[in-house]
Amino acid sequence: MENKEKMYEELLSLATKKYTPDEVELIKKSYEFAFLKHQGRVRLNKTEYMTHPLGVALILLDLDVDAVTIAAALIHETINHADATKEEIEELFGSEVASIVYVISKLNRLELSDDSEHAALNLRKILVGMSEDVRVLFLKMADRLHNLRTADALDKEALKKKVHETMTVLIPIAHRLGMYKIKGEMEDLCLKYSKPDVYNDILERLNASFEELHESLEEMEESISEMLMEQNIPFKIKSRVKSVYSIYNKLNNGKKWENIYDILALRVIVEKVSECYLAIGLIHAKYRPIPGRFKDYIAMPKANMYQSLHTGVFGSDGNRYEIQVRTEEMDEFAEKGVASHFAYKEKHYIKNVMEQRLEILRNLIEANASLSDIEFASDVENELLNDSIYVFTPKGDVLELPIGSTPLDFAYRIHSDVGDHCVQAIVNDTSVPLNYELHNNDIVKIRTNMAATPNKEWLSFVKSSHAKNKIKAYFSKQDKEMYTEKGKTILANEIRKRKLSFDQVLSNDNIKKICKDLKLETIDDIYFSIGSLRYTAAYIINLTTEDKKNVEDIMLEKVSQNNASLKSNKNSNSEILVDNQDGILVNLAKCCQPVFGDEIVGYITKGEGVTVHKKDCPNVKNKENRFVKVEWNKEVSADFLTDIDVTTDISKNYLLDLISKATSKKVYIDGVKTKNKELETVYTLTLKVKDKEQLEDYMNSLYAYKFVKKVERK
């Protein structure tokens, strides 16, 4: 049972060694504030509530975070579970502490909406997107780890939910950010709670020879220590029996117990890189190496910049040992990931990997806001969950990029201006093409020319979403400027043609009226809407000359409700033809999502032009006025988005089957949402189809699967 007084004593003892007297005072003041706010409260496990923030602070101390983070940890629950306010905290502890506490209080109110991958991905996006200060994520991880350590008091359902959220949301973030020690302990605890039989079985197999295993480790430690002392090599040795979750993972992937070589492991920590190689040579001279087990991750670091020498040897007792040899800094990085740079940022050459990773994910979230979940998940997987490469600037700063990245990806990661004006790339002192594939440890130099501009061909070979979106944004801006100028010219010509005054047509009042009627913001938006053919210049002028009527009234007057035939405009680029009218904004209704072949009606909607609904759409069923005749334009080929619900049994995840069937029917799935119910699963698929016939063919084909219960359009 945790004891508040002992925990606080330990915290102060450790803090005094790490921080300045002023910083220690900040920590004391934070504790006193939190103690008063939480006084009288107890946790579910019957301990005083203050044991939780103290436990979180102690976990963070091991990560070498700054005193501000420790102070925030101590008061991080005072907003949600007491009566503290952000303003009060800011006044007492400053804006940094207040900002961290305020964000963590918001994050701790979030939870998974359901058990789907979509929900987990969405929560991951929100967590990282809101954590502008990396210390918020440190605090979130430590908070969850301490909750798991003391989760025995939770009811079965609440514990299951907590474990699922940790496995699907927090552990992937911890893994990607290199917070290995926290990740490992959370994995063990999640396995303990989610699969207690498996966990206990592995524990029993270890404990069956636990004393024997530790005796073997002690003997090997003593032997290696003697060798190193004889050579006057300063060292430390750590030993451990492999974690339960790591063993479970290997067994689950088909390995047999007897083929797991690293159940017994020792870590030798020396001062210099040269001593790493000397130590491994001494070990190999005395103990027979296991073939194929030696790895040099110092000369060739892993993709996440992990460095160490690994070997496997047969001990004199017949046991197999995994031995790692590394320097102190390498060990800090292996244990704490990027958090170790709070202590080593001046000495270590990977200063800002964590900040880069957060920036990458934020850029993805911002740039891909309009993408479907599948597309976003693909981008996240490519950029954040797959292996990366690490390349260097000429000054020695490191940048993390997706595997397959080019010098242009590097240039845009530095700054959009560097990418936009890039003219030459030099990699390892050699000039290379801009589509050259970069490799780990490359040193990249970019030469720019302010007269140079992006090329659309770059989109065919850049790898990172960040670079692609910056290039697209450049051309989108160019196109907008072009269409705006074009629209301005078209409107001016139409005004002259009608012998009207430019200043009169575009008076301040008229501009306000047009913007209000068409839901635009500025006069440039009006020009752009004309240049991009959204509205005609004549239509815009007519809105100003009939100023007593709103846009819907003008449309109603212009549309002949009694005309039996629709105007067939063979040159129209719109999927929809509107009765006798050109230049009218047409939208497909989002409520019923009509596709080519559906029976449709047009309804004049305020500020939206004509909205096209399915004839049986309930949203227009009882409407009487403002209808206009519309029909599909058979001369235009287009894709249409529409949603369907596929209800299946709950025996397994059938998404792959639904996607496979769609591929065979040449139907594109643009998005997926999954809702798990007690007796069934409902997949909401956003489909891109050519027409109603293709849609119905796909829907009917799904009934060939026995697991499909029902398929219907939304």
Image: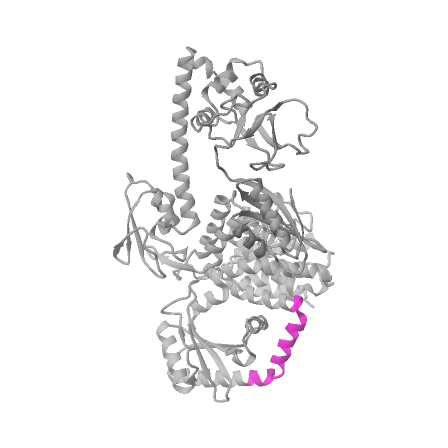
In the rendered view, does 561 fall on the left or right side of 152? Answer: left
Q: Position of residue 591 (x, y in %)?
A: 63, 36
With respect to residue 343, does 375 lie above or below?
above
Total count of labels: 0
In the rendered view, does 404 fall on the left or right side of 53? Answer: left
Residue sitting farthest toward the left: 430
Residue sitting farthest toward the top: 499
Which residue shows up at 64% across the image and 55% down it? Answer: 115
Q: For residue 473, what is the image quadrant?
A: top left
Is residue 43 among the parts visible in the rendering? no
- Magenta region: 192-215
Instruction: Depth check: give the residue in front, 256 or 266.
Output: 256
Q: Position of residue 648 (x, y in %)?
A: 66, 54
State which quarter of the image contains the C terminus.
Answer: top right
Residue 197 is one of the magenta-drawn residues: yes
With respect to residue 210, does 540 lie above or below?
above
With respect to residue 323, does 523 lie above or below?
above
Q: Position of residue 619 (x, y in %)?
A: 67, 32
Q: Position of residue 407 (x, y in %)?
A: 33, 52
Q: Which colour scheme appears in the figure?
A: one colour
With respect to residue 693, does 535 lie above or below?
above
Q: For residue 650, what is the image quadrant?
A: bottom right
Instruction: Depth check: give the residue in front, 328 or 292.
Output: 292
Residue 4 is one of the magenta-drawn residues: no
